[in-house]
Image (spheres, coloured by chain):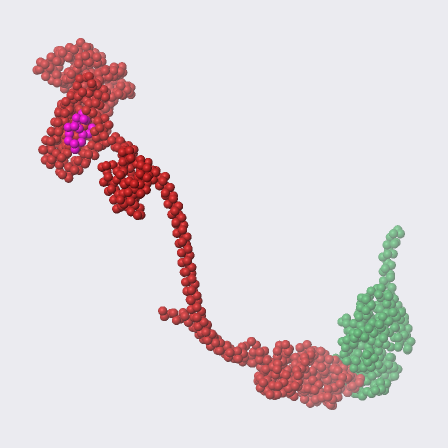
Amino acid sequence: MTSNRLRSLLLLFVPLALMSLPLAAADLPEIKARGELRHLGIRYANFVTGAGDGFDAELAQGFARHLGVDYKLIYSDFYSVIRDLLGKDVLRSGDSVRLEGDYPVKGDMIATGFTVLPWREQILLYSEPTFPSQVMLIARADSPIQPIAGSDDLSADIRETKALIGKQSLLVMERTCLDPANYGLKGRDLELRAYTKSTNINEMVPALLQLDADLSLLDVPDLILDMQKWAGAFKVIGPISEEQVLAAAFPKDAPQLRDAFNAYLRKIKEDGAYDRLVSKYYPGVQRYFPAFFAKQD
Amino acid sequence: MPFLPLRRHWMVLAAAVLSCYLVVLLSNAYRSQSQLRDAAEARLLAESHQTAVLMGDFLEDLRRFAADLTEIHEIETFLTNRALGMSMRYGLNANLAALEASFQAKLAQKRLLGAPVYARILYFDQDGTLLADTRPGAPLDPHLAAGAPSERLLIDEEHGRILASAPVMYRGNPSGKVVTLSRLDLLSRYLTSSAQELGFRQLLVTASGRPLNQPGKALPDASGLLSLTEIPPETLVSLDGLPALSDTVLSEAFDLALRVPVAQGVLSVVTLLPGSVLYGHITSRAFLYFASMVPVILVAVVLVIARMRRRARRLEADVIESNRNRAELQGRNDALTAEIARRKALETRLRESEERYRTYIEHAPEGVFVADSAGRLVDVNPSACDMVGYASAELLGMSVTDLAPPDARHEHLRTLEQVLDKGRYELEIDLRRKDGSQIVGSLRAITLPGQLVMGFCVDITERKRAEEQIHSLAYFDPLTGLPNRRLLLDRLSQLMAAGSRRQEYGALLMLDLDHFKDLNDTQGHDVGDRLLAEVARRLTARVRADDTVARIGGDEYVIVAGELGTVQAEAALQAEQIAEKIHRVLDRPYALVEGRSLHHSAASVGVALFCGQELSVDQILKQADVALYQAKNAGRNTVRFFNPDMQAAIEARATLEAALRCAIECDELQLYYQPQVDRYGRLVGAEALLRWLPPDGEPVSPVRFIPLAEETGLIIPIGYWVLEQACAQLRLWQEDPRMRGLTLSVNVSARQFHQPDLVSQVRETVAISGIDATRLKLELTESVVLDRVEQVIARMRNLKMLGLGFSLDDFGTGYSSLSYLKRLPLDQVKIDQAFVRDIVRDHNDAAIVRAVLAMSQSLGLNVVAEGVETVEQRDFLLQHGCELFQGYLFGKPVPIDALSLPQVPLTTDGGSWAIASCQ
């Protein structure tokens, strides 16, 4: 074998080897150098509809335009989305979070109604809140459990609501915003039924109506949609969580990208584009979270 | 002129017709205007009503929309979830938010003419609590402060709102109300474009009279507007008829107002407009009223104009008449000026013409004489002076008669009278010159004004002399001075005409001097001329003065004597006396040549009598000629009168001459051949004899036509024809060995023989025929050979040189001189049958025959005896030495085919053939 032939083989296999290695997360310069922003999205409520649009889909598309790069939507799910962003799998143990393994980094940012949770903040870099949320306890319409009357004390209302769970089975979805661990529902002798048929939170109400459990957790964005969709089929019992915020998540090593997003977010809130997106995908949510949107003003 | 008034007043009539037309037109216009006004008002009412209906529909839409909103899905969802007991804070808020979002969507959807229809949508629960509001936080309308209003439709004039509410029912229970708020001024968008510039205004007025206007449009002055509601609904009224509005600003800009209620009278659409906008260009009634007066005015104006035109026409006619008079005057002045100029020019031309004519006359070659009515010469030109040899001054003191020869004075005076009488006269006039000589002038005289006579005279003396000389030459014989044939004919015609009137006889005597030719030939022509002149003198001297003696040629004279009486016998007697006198006077001897003996001459005279114009001049001359011919035949020196027998003979002779000419052309002439035999009766030859055999008649005797042919000259062509025929026959004989020795004799007349070309003609004929000329014999008579004997002898010799021979025919009948006979180159002598006929009985004839035979034998001439008819005659002749015979005894003249020809060749010594007929 001649040296020339050896050089030719090297030229053939080196690119293949490089392509097989997991790509590291990229910050703003790399993305601009690459010319493309990869958006990791999960089909969830009206954030990422699966049809290519959605509140977060348009938000990321506008951000890519803001950066002057191409936009690419890469679908994921709540179980894999952090791994797809960081290239590491997430292992939680109590409040500790550990990243393990090496996986391909498929995206540069997560924007998909991604709730800002403390454990997530350990491994991710969140942007400023993009949307409000809260987790509610819902029951079928024929449930004997009556909704709470509600008061100005949210904590009292949360306690009252949780108290109504009793022995009723509760449908939850772990590793999502409906993870019971997030709201202190584990370990309290509650019959938690994790929904595992799908990673799509949108299926929680249908599962409830199909008697997968007596109760279910449901986030407000989904709630707003589902109350129109299955009006009269279920009822909201009361709040399970405090008011939450949703935000875009970036790798810890992509602060420039996160800052650029924040700048973009502030810009569209100022020019009204943000409000148009909210009204487009979640009409009336301002009325539900007046405080959050009042801040925007 | 029945049409005259019509023509005169056509304008009035036209105006009347036009007025009628205008009346009809205006009535139609009035009716049309009324219809247009009604239509315009109806259209305005319809449009306003339409606007009101649209507004009413709009309000009804508001109510329906509010009712429709109560049934939207979001309300039902809300009420359902509320029924499930969900709290407002943690569940129903989401529904209400969706409901508000739905309301917001409705707000955006509903638009009217570009403007949002709804300003706000609210949802109150049955307790009046506001649950949903498209404008959360905004102040509520006072009518909503206590919750939704009870009225389905509420007009909030104060805040300019329209509130529509509809109850929400859920499962049969009242569950609140949906209220919509709209801006009241939206209704004004239904108003017809009410721009001020279009000239009208349309207002929406509330029940309280408050006007609502379109956004951005200034409301009119509100003063008085409250009274707009007082306008009767759906009735177009005049603002002047509304006391509340008549004094307002509106009344200044608008004339009419129409109010149409909207929504059961809650609102009204009020249209304010001036009449001009509503009715457009429709002519106003006032104009129509005024226009209706136009025809009357027009007729009046036309009448005035017609009157003015009549005045103008009269004035114009006066002007035209004045102009015409002026023009006529001008024309006359011009004509007078032109006439003056013309006359001046005429005077100039006249003066020039006079000078010119004076020059012409002064230099004219004619003599110009001007005399007064008394004949005194008053002017002459130089040519006149030269003509008569007087000076001008001399002539001006003379009379025209002074210029006349003594015997022509009276003629001159008569000529003067003729000129004065006729004004123009032309004649030839004799003038006497100063030296006494006479001249002849051709005078052409005319009269001049003032009883003057102007004569142009040309001296034609020389011309007259020339004419007389020409006349003399034309009518007189220059030798004798007697009238010539032309003048004779003229005078004879005059005499015949005069005799015709008086039925008198006249006589024409034609005379011919006997033997005058001999005198001429022997004494010369000058002597002959002297004889002719002397005869003329004697004749002229002997006849009467009125008789005419003429010389018509040669030695022929004619004497015409008239007035011989009315009896033919007496006339003949007088004519005979005249003829005798002529004879006597001409019989006297003539001293023609001095020193010589006197010449004696006589004349033959033919006389023809005539009476008037029974005969023509030519016939009379011919008769005289015939008589003269008879006189000459009668032995000359005698007188013969013409008689009808003479005429018959002449005519028969003429007829025969014509027939002979025709016979020549028609080949009626033929040669017969009479055999000549020798002593043994053998044929030795023949004599060709001419015969005339008309195809439709008896043969004509040669005794008749031969002399005629000689007289007329026809004998010349006949003779040559005979010669040709004889040569041709001889040629045939000579081609036949049996007849080659025959001799053919041909008679030649004296006239033919004396033809200058005889020798050449014979030579040519012989040459053409190719005969042996020695067998051709020409027979001549004594008369031939005795006339110009020398010439005859010469020709005979020339002909003999061709080979042919000569025979002397009829020998013994004439006066042949033996000396001549001796000189003639004859070959043969023929004894005339006159001697042969009685030769047996008459001793004289026998003696003559014997002498002739003896002489011939001594001269070596052959002798042929003619007319031998008997054997005795043949024997006698044969006994006395005659060897050749011709006569009936041997054969008559027959055609060649009948001639007995020899069957064996003739020998030169005569042969053995004999004439069969003789045997």
Identify the colour of chain B in the image: red
For the C terminus of chain B, the quadrant is top left
Residue furthest left as drawn: B841
Q: Measuring 91% from the left and 77% from the top, which residue is drawn there?
A: A95
The one of B652 and B313 positioned closer to us in this rendering: B313
The one of B627 and A51 positioned closer to us in this rendering: B627
For the N terminus of chain B, the quadrant is bottom left
Identify the colour of chain A in the image: green
Horizontally, residue B203 falls left or right of residue B362, namely right
Horizontally, residue A202 falls left or right of residue B456, namely right
Residue B155 image point, x, y percent: 67, 86
Horizontally, residue B881 falls left or right of residue B3, namely left
- The answer to which quarter of the image holds residue B737 is top left
Residue B178 image point, x, y percent: 71, 85
Q: Measuring 35% from the left and 39% from the top, which residue is drawn there?
A: B364
The one of B80 and B550 positioned closer to us in this rendering: B550
Q: Give the residues in magenta.
A: B535-551
Q: Measuring 53% from the left and 80% from the top, which residue is drawn there?
A: B286
- The answer to which quarter of the image holds residue B322 is bottom left
